[in-house]
Image: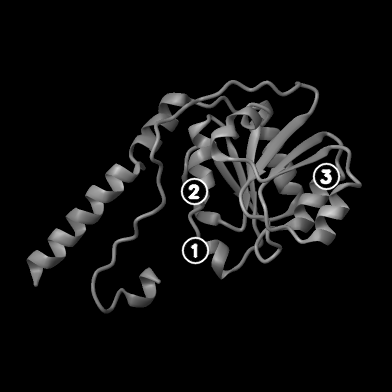
Amino acid sequence: LQHKFQALRPIQLITNGLFDKAAFLPRTAKKNSYHVGYFGHLTDKWFNWELLFKLAEDKRFVIHLIGEGAPARLLEKLTQYANVTYHGYVPQAALTKLIVLFDVGIIPFKMSKLSMAVDPLKVYEYLQYGRPVVSSGIPHLSSYPYCYDVSDDEAFKLAIINAVDNVTVDYSRVDHFLSNNTWIKKCYELLLINHEYTSCE
């Protein structure tokens, strides 16, 4: 949309943000496997279920799914995998009890015009809790700290393994990124843009 309407007037893109500060949580997952988690909507319109099932077939990965919107046939298929736990809807206030189980936050989206245009709130929340992020279908996330967007199933696995085995999250770097992406700063940015535009009229 930014590119589409740029000819009408200068348009500044304002991404998602956080209300809260970073709240880094220690990992409690067992070290002999890779624990990943997702929270959010699970519709098959954009959630890449095929990629998730490929991941579940590899018993090195333990998967926690939190959210609603998944078709019944896919939830039924999940029951075939002992290494997948579907938690259903979990209130925001209770998420931290599950996030400590994650080594990595995942966002497995199908590549589409929609996925390339989204800026998921969950990426900020994963980082808020000190978790690296592995995604698919959202290339621009690779410009965020400790976020790795990949294009195929095998690369998704390798990115998770690398994030757990080889990446040490520098919390000060994450905190700097998040502090520049609070909704307070977004509001000031919006007000400044509006002031500059109206001043030019």
Q: How many marks?
A: 3
What is the distance, in whole Å, between disc 3 and disc 2 at their CAs? 25 Å
**As drawn, which residue projects farthest toward the bottom?**
8
- Residue under circle 2? 121
Question: What SS does tag 1 mark?
Answer: helix
Residue 110 appears in the rendering: yes
Residue 158 tag number: none
- Residue under circle 1? 117
Could you tell whether 199 is left or right of 185 in the image? left
Asked whether disc 3 touches disc 1, contact meaning CB atoms under 8 Å apart, the reply is no
* Amino acid of disc 1: Ala
Mark 1 is surrounded, within 10 Å at the Cα level, by few (under 14), some (14 to 19) or many (20 or more) other residues, namely: some
Residue 146 appears in the rendering: no
Where residue 147 sits, quadrant-wise, is top right
Mark 2 is surrounded, within 10 Å at the Cα level, by few (under 14), some (14 to 19) or many (20 or more) other residues, namely: few
Could you tell whether 72 is left or right of 68 in the image? right
Residue at image coords 30%, 74%: 6
**As drawn, which residue projects farthest toward the right?**
80
- Residue under circle 3? 56
